[in-house]
Image: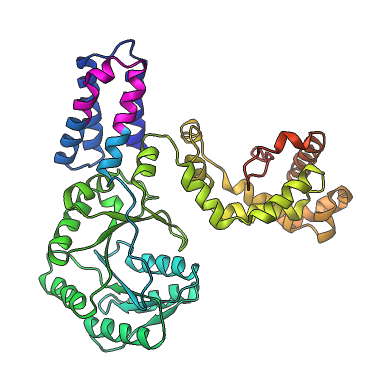
Amino acid sequence: MFENLSDKLEVVLKKLRGAGKLTEKNIKDSMREIRRSLLEADVNYKVARDFIKAVEQKAIGAEVLQSIDPGQLIVKIVHDELVALLGGKNEPVAPVDKSPTVYMVCGLQGSGKTTLTAKIALSVKRKNKKALMVAADTYRPAAVKQLQVLADQIAVEHFSLEGKKPPEICREAVKYAEKNFIDLVLLDTAGRLHIDDELMTELEDIKAQVDPHELLLVTDAMTGQDAVKVAQEFHGRLGITGVVLSKLDGDARGGAALSIRAVTGCPIKLASTGEKVSDLEPFHPDRMASRILGMGDIVSLVEKAEETIDMEQTKQMQEKLLKAQFNFEDFLEQMKQLKKMGPLDSLLGMIPGVGKAMKNVRVDESAMERMVAIIKSMTIEERRSPTIIDGSRKKRIALGSGNSVQAVNQLLKQFNAMQKMFHSMNKKKFRGLPKGMMPGNFGNF
């Protein structure tokens, strides 16, 4: 997401940084280009206008024009205004500290409500709390079944009542949660158009009966300005407490993310970044602004690593690597941990500078899959002692993994080269290595 907008902003800001001297004219010309880029990204017209006005007022100030590095200072001004536009600071969802806490989820059809319900349920479960997913969509065929499948997939309890209306289902679900000491009740309501008065009234009835601690509107980031209009209407009828941006991994222009807070006043609380039930992040305006300007997001990357990687195990593997004791079993475990963090291209995009450098480079994740297939075709003895792999073993491994003997040879060659390189290096050289970061390069496989 934001790729086109990021590229255009980068070009404009690069011109300003490279200018020998900043003047009111070149600042105004640049602001005009930024405004055009925002509108092309489907940002609300008034929001784009106000944003440019705020940046321009600060950029033309004497402090900037007389600064030692005015170009960099303007980048900071744009960044700070983007942060303000997106909400200023992270506003978390209501804490699950009462039993039961109730979250009501609403939005248009196909916006990702049921999947979001599962994602929130999983995040709560990981904090050792009990969640209940409630099927309050009695209109869409197979809606109840979809929720049950997702709940079973993450081993979370689900609730439904056949033949009952949504307000009654939600009310009974809360009563059930009270009796069974459930921490969080997630009400997955039916998708509806904001102009459907009857269905909107139904949401009002549900809200009146259960008094949710959080009323979340799921908006599809790929719908642009339509998402903003929907948010306005839902907020006017229901008084939503927060917005969740779904499908941020898609080819969206970004207009919804940059407009919703300014237009509705409702904070964006969560961001759904992929199709997996684990792909859910708190929305941080400062981090999103950094991503838009191509500055990366190292804080989110570290948080992902801390959530998914066993640091103690990784530390032990680093020691084994430095002593040339690192084997294919260890390597396979590292691949599993890395895969849990998400797609490689999205992870690389969080590293400052790397995202820009690789924006036209396609990360071939199939290469990792081939490596894993080859290693899994090895016997335990071969994984632990790769030196015993001779010609006949290579043929068997290649056949079992669906690869060529040449591919097996290439993997063994790279692995041996890595072993020799680290064996010859002094440990002191790696004392500053960040925890969880395993050295080694298999990128050319």
Place of residue 410 in the rendered image (x, y in percent of width and height, measured from the top left): 75, 41
Q: Give the quarter of the figure containing the N terminus.
A: top left
Q: What secondary structure is the stretch in magenta mostly built from?
A: helix
Place of residue 331 in the rendered image (x, y in percent of width and height, measured from the top left): 71, 51
Rendered view: 387 above or below 420: below
Q: Give the quarter of the figure containing the C terminus.
A: top right
Rendered view: 326 above or below 192: above
Q: Nearer the viewer, residue 437 or 378?
A: 437
* Residue at 54%, 46% in the rendered image: 344
* Residue at 46%, 73% in the rendered image: 129
From the viewer's perspective, is 202 left or right of 67?
left
Q: Nearer the viewer, residue 367 or 174?
A: 174
Place of residue 239 in the rendered image (x, y in percent of width and height, measured from the top left): 17, 64
Q: Is residue 124 magenta?
A: no
Q: Quadrant of residue 190?
A: bottom left
Q: Is residue 56 magenta?
A: yes
* Residue at 62%, 42% in the rendered image: 434
* Residue at 32%, 46% in the rendered image: 252
Q: How is the image coloured?
A: rainbow
Q: Nearer the viewer, residue 161 or 397?
A: 161
Rendered view: 226 above or below 126: above
Place of residue 416 in the rendered image (x, y in percent of width and height, measured from the top left): 80, 41
Q: Quadrant of residue 62?
A: top left
From the viewer's perspective, is 283 left or right of 312?
left
Can residue 343 be seen by looking at this rendering? no
From the viewer's perspective, is 322 left or right of 435?
right
Range of residues picked out in magenta: 55-78
Can residue 106 be seen by looking at this rendering? yes
From the viewer's perspective, is 315 left or right of 22?
right
Tell me how many marks there are: 0
